[in-house]
Image (cartoon, helix red, strand yellow):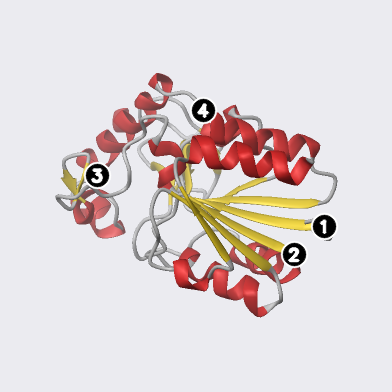
Amino acid sequence: MTDIQSIVVLTGAGISAESGVPTFRGPDGLWEGHRVEDVATPDAYARDPDLVLDFYDQRRANLDRVTPNEAHEALGRLDAEWPGELLIVTQNVDDLHERGGATRLLHMHGELKKGWCLACDARAPFDGTMADRPACASCGTAGQIRPDIVWFGEMPYEMDRIDDALAACDLFVSIGTSGAVYPAAGFVQGARHHGARTLELNLEPSEGSIFFHESRMGRAGELVPAWVDEMLG
């Protein structure tokens, strides 16, 4: 792959599952014991903000109990050593990529450790308890901070930047994704349309496996370091 100059990497729940972060939706259709409709939509927040804020407070607190795995660390090494263009786009809201060393990173679905003040539109790091209805550090209004998370029915962040990167990349790599959630599920087709090579690293074939030039099946903690070794030579 000596002709590769620009890489876009997409990561999903599968990469963090190996660190013990629960995947988005379990086989019973529940997300950590809750229906998605009750904790991950604007309507849910309007209907029962206490439930929603407490749910995300607990998930934020749980981040302290997990650590980056070999896949996160390998991508951090790629970030540090890859001389060309690189953008890591993650659907995950945890901070394991950052803790693994990645800096050329975009959270398209937001971040657990950020809050969004609905009073002044400020977004800022947040590591406390939103259910306590704290005041916004920017405007001073209390009780208006919600998780800076993209819920169902809301637009993922920085889609223009992602689309530009997909159009310009030579290689698109998808790691630990189901291929079921759009718009991320369509990234492989967008990259191929512009001539990029495409590679899938996943525990099992995704719904979009047919669109990749190559698919490698196995644990992210094994596949990603091996691929990074290939890229860095």
Q: CA distance from mark 2 to mark 4?
A: 27 Å
Q: CA distance from mark 3 to mark 1?
A: 46 Å
Q: CA distance from mark 1 to mark 4?
A: 27 Å
| Mark 2 lies on residue | 170
In-image side of 43 versus 196 (left or right): left
Dot 4 or dot 3, earlier in sequence: 3
Name the amino acid type tagged 3: Pro
| Mark 3 lies on residue | 49
Contact, mark 1 vs mark 2 (Cβ under 8 Å)? yes
In-image side of 55 versus 82 (left or right): left
Residue at position x 58%, y 27% in the image: 99
Name the amino acid type tagged 1: Gln
Q: Quadrant of residue 7?
A: bottom right
Query: Mark 2 against mark 4, which lies toward the viewer?
Result: 2
Can you give x and y, in whole percent of width and height, for residue 13 in the image?
41, 46
Q: CA distance from mark 4 to mark 3?
A: 31 Å
Q: Quadrant of the C terminus?
A: top right
| Mark 4 lies on residue | 68
Query: Mark 3 against mark 2, which lies toward the viewer?
Result: 2
Q: Is residue 11 above or below residue 135?
A: below
**SS of the residue under disc 4:** loop
Query: Mark 3 against mark 1, which lies toward the viewer?
Result: 1
- Rate crowding at label 2 as few (under 14), some (14 to 19) or many (20 or more) other CA atoms within 10 Å: many
Can you give x and y, in whole percent of width and height, for residue 125 in the image?
54, 33
Dot 2 or dot 4, earlier in sequence: 4
Residue 5's tag is 1
- Rate crowding at label 1 as few (under 14), some (14 to 19) or many (20 or more) other CA atoms within 10 Å: some
Query: Mark 4 against mark 3, which lies toward the viewer?
Result: 4
